[in-house]
Image (cartoon, rainbow, N blue to C red):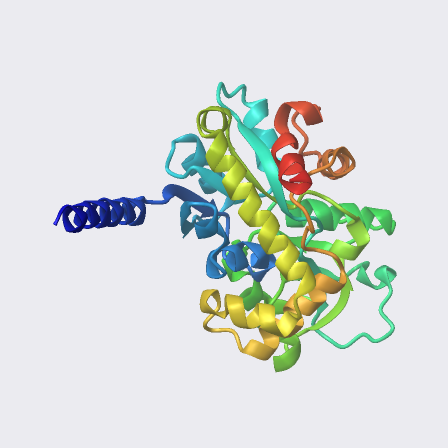
Amino acid sequence: MNKIRLFALVSGTFLIFLAACGSIENTSIKLGEVTRSLFYAPQYVALEKGFFEEEGLDVELQTVWGGDKTMTALLSDGIDVALVGAETSIYVYAQDSNDYAINFAQLTQTDGTFLVAKEQQPDFEWEDLKGSSFLGQRKGGMPQMVGEFVLKQHNIDPHNDLNLSQNIDFANIPSAFASGDYDYVQLFEPTASVFEKEGNGHVVASFGEESGHVPYTVFMAKQSYMSENEDNVDAFTRAVYKAQNWVEETDPAEIAEVIQPYFEDVDLDILTSSIERYKNQGSFATDPILDEEEWNNLKDIMEEAGELPEDVPYKDLVNTEIAEEVINN
């Protein structure tokens, strides 16, 4: 009889232990992305493949639509982590913020836009742009700054050699180009591939290939959040690195199938070709480290565009210790 009681007691204790383990909740992190873009494919892979959950995190993704809005949400604690261009951290720092944002994990390492022409140009030369009507991106944003940087490398003054338009909101640029009297435009994927498929435009060059490595989109958090939630940031970075490795080793078609829930209006073949295009030009960072050479390239691009408010040291706004520890372990 005593053995029965002992067995019941042990069994009951074990069941309570299992119930307690099952009731442990993952840590919640509010993540804000600057826009919805397949350029951020590794992020969606981390969500869909359960890499965040494996690290004990419950990541709630929201699309904030715009760099200014994203940084406002981050600084006001509307989100914990932001996926946005690294240049926004420089803008905030230059405003003497007491609790500025720190870049801790890089997601993309090139510009993500392509030069799309209204007409087919199999023998395109950059010189062809002179005198053309060019629909550009928002002033001060990375697409426009990189675009101007590349044009100047090809001896083109964007404000004097082009009929440059910058008065269209980001979301409306594709439709404005399709219906307007423009010769060229900068477009992200999958829009560039959709335009090619529908005959509304033709990719003639890549700004990502021309501009080199740059911390185009980076995960960042406020200083206070990082110091108070070090374990969360470590776990978040590990999940991102898992996704980066998976994307690097996986066929574009399989990646497209995984992230399609985030792009329900885009055909699977377009998603696949767009991801292949980004992979071929090395746009997806293969690890979360933002190195100093990339940071300096970013500042050169901003300075060339007249948008660098001050020379912010790499060590002040970039934390590589977390990413390095994740990779080494």
Residue 301: x, y in percent? 74, 39
Residue 117: x, y in percent? 72, 69
Left/right of residue 19 with respect to residue 97 in the rendered view: left
Q: Quadrant of residue 302?
A: top right
- Above or below 57: residue 100: above
Kindly give the residue lying farthest to the bottom in the view shown: 198
Q: Quadrant of residue 84?
A: top right
Number of marks in picture: 0
Residue 279 in sight here = yes
Residue 148: x, y in percent? 74, 47
Residue 259: x, y in percent? 52, 66
Write the residue at 38% across / 33% down: 77
Kindly give the residue lying farthest to the left in the view shown: 1
Residue 185 in sight here = no
Left/right of residue 168 with respect to residue 16 in the rendered view: right
Write the residue at 42% across / 51% down: 61
Left/right of residue 111 with respect to residue 141 in the rendered view: right
- Above or below 142: residue 48: below
Q: Quadrant of residue 288?
A: top right
Residue 148 versus residue 249: which sits nearer the camera?
A: 249
Quadrant of the frame with the C terminus: top right
- Above or below 31: residue 314: above
Write the residue at 61% across / 30% down: 90
